[in-house]
Image (cartoon, rainbow, N blue to C red):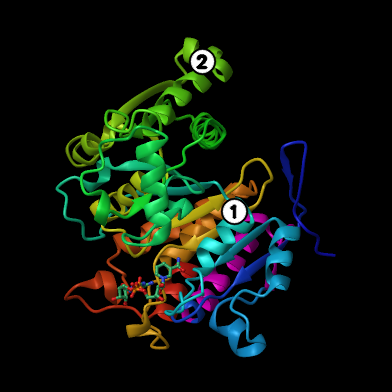
Amino acid sequence: MAEKVTFKNGKLHVPADPIIPYIEGDGVGQDIWQNAQLVFDRAVEKAYKGSRKIEWLEVLAGKKAFSQSGVWLPDASLEVIKSHLLAIKGPLETPVGGGIRSLNVALRQELDLFACVRPVRYFQGVPSPLKHPEKTDITIFRENTEDIYAGIEWEAGSSQVQKVIEFLQTQMQVQKIRFPESSSIGIKPISIEGSKRLIRSAIDYALAKGLRKVTLVHKGNIQKFTEGGFRKWGYELAQEEYAAELEKGRLVVDDIIADNFLQQILLNPERFDVVALTNLNGDYASDALAAQVGGIGISPGANINYQTGHAIFEATHGTAPDITGQDKANPCSLLLSGCMLFEYIGWKEAADLITAAIEKSFAAGCFTADLAGEAPSYSTSEFAQVLIENL
Ligand code: NAI
């Protein structure tokens, strides 16, 4: 009988037939989920010859949930994900209009998924703007819960912002607000705990993968206590918890200012293995890095709380309304997110099979329309069939 994945004493316990919740997603979500699930199941079957199997459990969110229950993110869906620890999801539409928060943000906040993990690598054959895109092989750890994303802001001209500015001027002797009458104000919280748990996860990931270098990316030259704190606490943590690894040379922790980082990933991307960033810098860097390997539409992502085991693996693109229902979408972002899920639960063989099948298909010039350029392209379902043959 299928069982839940559990988390005890800091470790995941994965049965041979785990129940994994999935959110199909809106728009192209349906096209890509159905095809991706076929590939996942065949890869598991092939890797473990029937001794392991995933029991997929559909969880409603987004438009499908709204049309059935009138709610975009039903409490029951959240409860299922909470109690099963893991989920994988397609893209969700953020309904435009007041009062409805992003479902993605809601899921991350509810489960305190503090690390946004994005492995960025090149697949041979994918069009890229760089001469040597294969030199980029970097895993991003973006802090997911703090920074200006906390959403603490007051609008220019509001009575609240007047109070904040008055407080700053009279109580804190702040004289540096250039236009106090017409400024909006935002607050950027960055904490010791928030920084350390993210950087610890990045270091553990690097060590587990046999990677040596963890780089702290920050803007500490300007924002001394927030971004500078992130850097300082990162070095502190490394000394406190990883002294032996540092001494043996198994781990190197260094840092770089965010603007220089954006130059260096273009000039010398091979300098970096794992990078840890605050939330906003991580947002910019994720898209810049994905673009340089041509993978903006195929890069995978996961949002993880390594302390509770909770994790949601997701396609990083949106719902692609322009190609919805046309069997045209590229399923690779979801597929590679699935590979991250398999690695997370220790089923590396299944992940490796899928990754190798994607490599082989791309190398043979088999692409969906988004990557094919002028060449003939494969539909989503044809592409999935090629992958299954290549497993
Ligand atoms: P989008 O990523 O949906 O589309 C941008 C362009 O990329 C379109 O031309 C689309 O056809 C193409 N594209 C995206 N995914 C593709 C795929 N798998 N294969 C081939 N082509 C693909 O971004 P957009 O238009 O800004 O957002 C549409 C909706 O998606 C919005 O409601 C937005 O809130 C939501 N969204 C959801 C995300 C998530 O759930 N993680 C992330 C980004 C946007």
Residue position marked by numbered label 1 in the rendering: 342
Residue 303 lies, with reference to residue 10, above or below; the image says: below
Q: Position of residue 19 (x, y in %)?
A: 73, 63
Q: Earlier in the sequence, mark 2 or mark 1?
A: 2
What are the residue bounds of the magenta stretch?
Answer: 31-58
Whether residue 139 is visible: yes
Ligand 1 lies in quarter: bottom left
The quadrant in which the N terminus is found is bottom right
Q: Is residue 380 left or right of residue 284?
A: right
Q: Position of residue 181 (x, y in %)?
A: 26, 54
Residue 50 lies, with reference to residue 267, above or below; the image says: below
Quarter of the image for residue 154 reads bottom left
State yes or no: Cβ of the residue under disc 2 lies below 8 Å from any atom of ligand 1: no
Q: How many marks?
A: 2
Residue position marked by numbered label 2 in the rendering: 239
Q: Residue at x 16, y 50 (%)?
A: 130
Is residue 51 part of the magenta span, yes or no?
yes
The kind of residue on which mark 1 rests is: Phe
The kind of residue on which mark 2 rests is: Gln
Q: CA distance from mark 2 to mark 1?
A: 32 Å
Residue 269: image tag: none
**Is label 2 in a helix, a strand or a loop?**
helix
- Main secondary structure type of the part rendered in magenta: helix
Residue 111 lies, with reference to residue 206, above or below; the image says: below
Instruction: Name, please, the residue furthest toward the top.
Output: 247
Q: In this orientation, which residue lies closer to the viewer: 363 or 36?
A: 36
Q: Position of residue 244 (x, y in %)?
A: 55, 12
Q: Residue at x 17, y 37 (%)?
A: 267
Label 1 crowding class (10 Å Cα cut-off): few <14, some 14-19, many 20+? some
Whether residue 54 is visible: no
**Is label 1 in a helix, a strand or a loop?**
helix
Q: Is residue 280 left or right of residue 204?
A: left
